Image (cartoon, grey):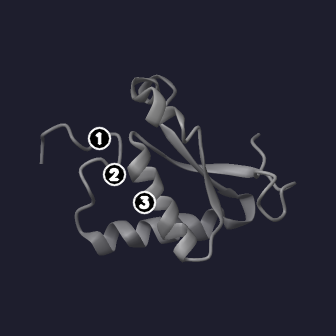
Amino acid sequence: MPKVPDDMPNADDDAIEIATFPYLHVAEFAASVLEGSDIECFIGDQFLGGIRPELTFTSGGIKLFVRAADVDRALEVLAELESAAGELPDHWDDDAGDGEE
């Protein structure tokens, strides 16, 4: 199980993957929303998408992690974002961007 990065408080806590994204900029957007709600998070393999974008798809996407204690709250924040936005950006999830409405 991944650990919280050493530069974050409570680095011994377990990190839980709460979402995956096909593109780094979408993962960064979700992370900024969580951070704005005082939920610390980090993006796994964040540099992979910039250096070799094609590897993002083979690795299962860009992963967003939070502390185990923050999972429920983080999922609520992202769900509120989705409902408030009405329609999220094209690449919010793996099914988006296929040209179908």
Label 1 residue SS: loop
Label 2 residue SS: loop
Q: Which residue is mark 3?
A: 29
Tell me: 61 left or right of 2. left
Q: Position of residue 94 (x, y in %)?
A: 35, 40
How far apart are labels 1 and 3 at the CA level? 18 Å
Label 3 residue SS: helix
**Residue at x-position 49% and y-position 30%:** 60
Q: Which residue is mark 1?
A: 95
Q: Residues within 10 Å of mark 2 (few under 14, many from 20)?
A: many
| Nearest-to-viewer mark from 2 and 3 | 3
Compared to residue 4, the image places residue 87 above or below, namely below
**Residue at x-position 47% and y-position 30%:** 51
Q: Nearer the viewer, residue 80 or 92?
A: 92
Q: Which residue is mark 2?
A: 92
**Residue at x-position 12% and y-position 48%:** 101
Q: Amino acid at mark 2?
A: Trp
Dividing the picture into quarters, in which one does residue 29 lie?
A: bottom left
Q: Amino acid at mark 1?
A: Asp
Tell me, yes or no, whether the two marked residues, 1 and 2, touch with CB atoms within 8 Å: no
How far apart are labels 2 and 3 at the CA level? 10 Å
